[in-house]
Image (cartoon, rainbow, N blue to C red):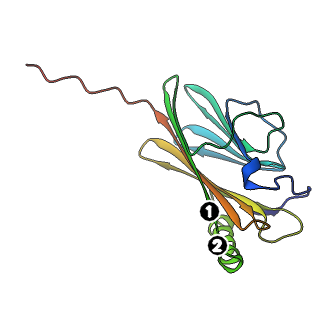
Amino acid sequence: MLTTLTTAYTDTRAADLAWALGREPLPALATLDLELSGAKLQLRLLGASHQVLLEQRQGICSETVACIPGSSTPLPLGVAKRIGDWEYEFAARVETLSRGSFAGRAQELLALVADHPKGLAGVFPGSPHAFTAMLAQWHEGQMHWRTWHAYPQEGQLVATRTRVGARVAAPEPAPA
């Protein structure tokens, strides 16, 4: 689903993004509710980027990547955490592209997400290349989502990927 967001472009630089796990739901400009293999997932576009809410039998998990006033947790390159019975993995990277490459990559990503049944993208007013896009999938018993945050004024694209799944017990040692 592709939507035009009716808000001012809040994220001004990729470097302003912060990451948080476990925050309460923030006001969303657009949402997409999904149910995948018994898990409820809500993709949320914020005026300041994205939030994902995941509800499974084990409880609720939230991930927020946004400009969070007062946040002291910058966007990490990677995180691996155990949350109850879940394993959570997050990775982020920032790409700096030339103007032409940026425009082409922006169009490619928006086309990928716009008509995808598990995708949500929002374009901010003022630039067709200022957007946040999200895509979710269920694969081999694990929830995955990817996000892209575009900063055309800097030619930067922030890409994240997240995996959440049930913690797998270590195999029992073979008898001696």
Q: Identify which residue is drawn at 84% across, 50% down.
A: 47
- Front tag of 2 and 1: 1
Residue corresponding to mark 2 = 105
* Residue closer to the observer: 148 or 136: 148
Residue type at numbered disc 1: Glu
Mark 2–mark 1 CB contact (< 8 Å): yes
Q: Identify which residue is drawn at 11% across, 19% down.
A: 175
Residue type at numbered disc 2: Arg
Answer with mark 2 or mark 1, whichever residue precedes in sequence.
1
In this picture, residue 107 sits left or right of residue 47 = left
The image shows residue 170, relative to residue 9, as above or below, that is: above
The image shows residue 121, relative to residue 175, as above or below, that is: below
The image quadrant that residue 151 belongs to is bottom right
Image coordinates for residue 82, horizontal then vertical, percent:
50, 27
Image coordinates for residue 12, horizontal then vertical, percent:
82, 56
Q: Does residue 147 appear anywhere in the picture?
A: yes
Q: Identify which residue is drawn at 91% across, 58% down.
A: 6
Image coordinates for residue 43, horizontal then vertical, percent:
69, 47
Q: Classify the position of the C terminus by image quarter.
A: top left
In this picture, residue 58 sits left or right of residue 27 = left
**The label number, if any, that marks residue 106 in the structure image:** none
Residue corresponding to mark 1 = 95
The image quadrant that residue 171 belongs to is top left
Considering every residue shown, the one lying at the far bottom of the view is 100
